[in-house]
Amino acid sequence: MLLREAIGDPTLRSYSVVILDEAHERTIHTDVLFGVVKAAQKRRKELGKVPLKVIIMSATMDVDQFSQYFSGAPVLYLEGRQHPIQIFNTKHPQSDYLQAALVSVFQIHQEAPSSQDILVFLTGQEEIEAMTKTCRDIAKHLPEGCPRMMVMPLYASLPYSQQLRVFQAAPKGCRKVILSTNIAETSITIPGIKYVVDTGMVKAKKYSPDTGLEVLAVQRVSKAQAWQRTGRAGREASGVCYRLYTQEEFDTFDRMTVPEIQRCNLASVMLHLLALRVPNVLAFDFMSRPSPVFTEQPWVTAESWRASSCQREQGAVWSCGEHEEAIQAAIEQLELLGAVERKENQLVLTPLGRKMAAFPLEPKFSKTILLSPKFHCTEEILSIVALLSVDSVLYSPPARRDEVQAVRRKFICSEGDHLTLLSIYRAFKNVSGNKDWCRENFVNSRNMMLVSDVRAQLRDICLKLSLPMESSRSDSTNVRRCLAHSLFMNAAELQPDGTYSTLDSHQLVAIHPSSVLFQCKPACVVYNGLLHTSKCYMRDLCVVDAEWLHEAAPEYFRRRLRVARD
């Protein structure tokens, strides 16, 4: 919100103090704001205006880097009220961190008083659900005298009502064991936690500007993350943290987490910087230059990590190239979308680009909305974009997989995931967001309410831009044509051998198992993004006609065809 306000007023005249909290998380918007508020400070000083004070706050951060960036700003240390925590490391490296976590949980459970709860840090939903089932199965066969165990998963896409269960006290004589992603590192504090089991692993995204490939890889946490996890054990009383890695391994961890700006698509950042009238986006004063670019495989997945201890040495290979590479790739995307143009060796926003910057969205989705009046489907596109802008609105408990598939069948659209989601949203609106309906249909009601809020905000922006609000009703062709015209850079074509190849980089890709098109073989599709886990998957697909893609960007596809022939 502050970043968007700065577009209208780069000197932030309405404010005398700006506080940026949780700075160590280094999200993309926070990093851009560092540069924005620093420039605002400098400009206000030059104009002789009231100075802008900036306060950067965090429990763990690289203090020297922040101080130097803000021209030697003073550092204030505040003593926390954290209780003492004992830390235990393993004597030897663990080849299977999940097995080590399981052994640790039951060792603590049999030795410690039942009133003290356990928090285990894992990497993702699949891992958590699998371990939840294993823990519950083992807990049924514990020796007499052992306290009962309540095992609770915690991850972002879990329905809100189930997330809230982790905050409720366990019954007398029963222990809570919470299996969580890094959502429990800083976002929330769970009462009653005495023991933390830290696997030392996290699932993080990395982005390649060369291929547009987003890799979701299991990797080691940073030292800052490890200390954050340890601190969860000492919030209410003294605690214990069991680290499932040796002290020598900990010493090799990165000191701080890699900033998001160094591992994501920068198209949105560049669009906002140009909207802020930054004269030279390549020279923008980033605290950390957006430089790392991965160059080759092998990829690390949870499965490959567990397969052998030597896999620890085989993470994705990264090289820190010039930061301009990531920025240039982002600018090229914006040029292809018609958002920017070059005038006298300067990049400027086109009228379309300025309208795109009005939306708090990825540029490709802003373009989708702005194209929708041409295809008379603005209402449908607003719903689809809102659905793709929040965490998953679908909840699929592994234990009820067959039931989930049977229920979802009535919503499935053979033309792809976008239209299937639209079908679910329409059904949700028809029952006025009834929570019982959401439970019966495995729909996350909280996220679906958020979709409605996001859609309303996007609709307001459309009205301010005087976009006509039209609906294509039951005709989905126009919706698919609109998606083809805005997502043409994310297109793939079926090959004679039954595989798919992206039209831009000729990357070999596959349809993700969660897609409604998983068992199908459409000739041509567009997708929202690529995700590399065990293989390179397309997520959120829509069936399109190849002619629509060439119609959307004829020169782009002609150029790609020439490159392929060469």
Image (cartoon, rainbow, N blue to C red):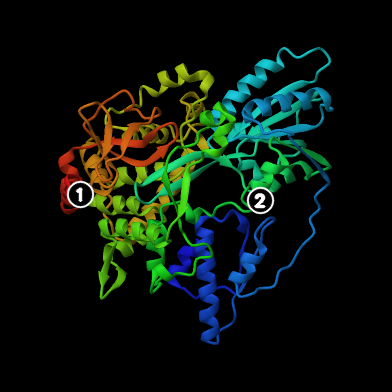
Q: Which mark is residue 69?
A: none
Left or right: where 565 falls relative to 471:
left
In this view, the residue in front, 178 or 331, is 331
In this view, the residue in front, 258 or 358, is 258
Q: Secondary structure at mark 2?
A: helix
Q: CA distance from mark 2 to mark 1?
A: 44 Å
Q: Which mark is residue 224?
A: 2
> In the image, residue 374 lies at what x, y percent?
20, 51
Binning the other alpha carbons within 10 Å of mark 1 as few (below 14), some (14 to 19) or many (20 upward) gives few
Kindly indicate the quadrant of the structure image that contains residue 120: top right
Q: Secondary structure at mark 1?
A: helix
Residue at 55%, 77% in the rendered image:
41
In this view, the residue in front, 17 or 502, is 502
Residue 12, visible in the rendered structure: no
Residue pointed to by mark 1: 563
In the displayed structure, 262 sits above or below 84; it is: below
Identify which amino acid the numbered label 2 is placed on. Answer: Ala
Left or right: where 503 falls relative to 426:
left
Left or right: where 534 falls relative to 413:
right
In this view, the residue in front, 275 or 444, is 275
Residue 439, visible in the rendered structure: yes
Of mark 2 and mark 1, the one earlier in the sequence is 2
Residue at 27%, 36% in the rendered image:
501
Front tag of 2 and 1? 1
> In the image, residue 73 lies at what x, y percent?
65, 73
> In the image, residue 373 lies at what x, y percent?
24, 51
In the displayed structure, 326 sits above or below 226; it is: below
Please give the count of numbered marks on the rendered protein.
2
> In the image, residue 45 lies at what x, y percent?
55, 83
Query: Circles 2 and 1: CB distance less than 8 Å?
Result: no
Extreme-bottom residue of the structure: 48
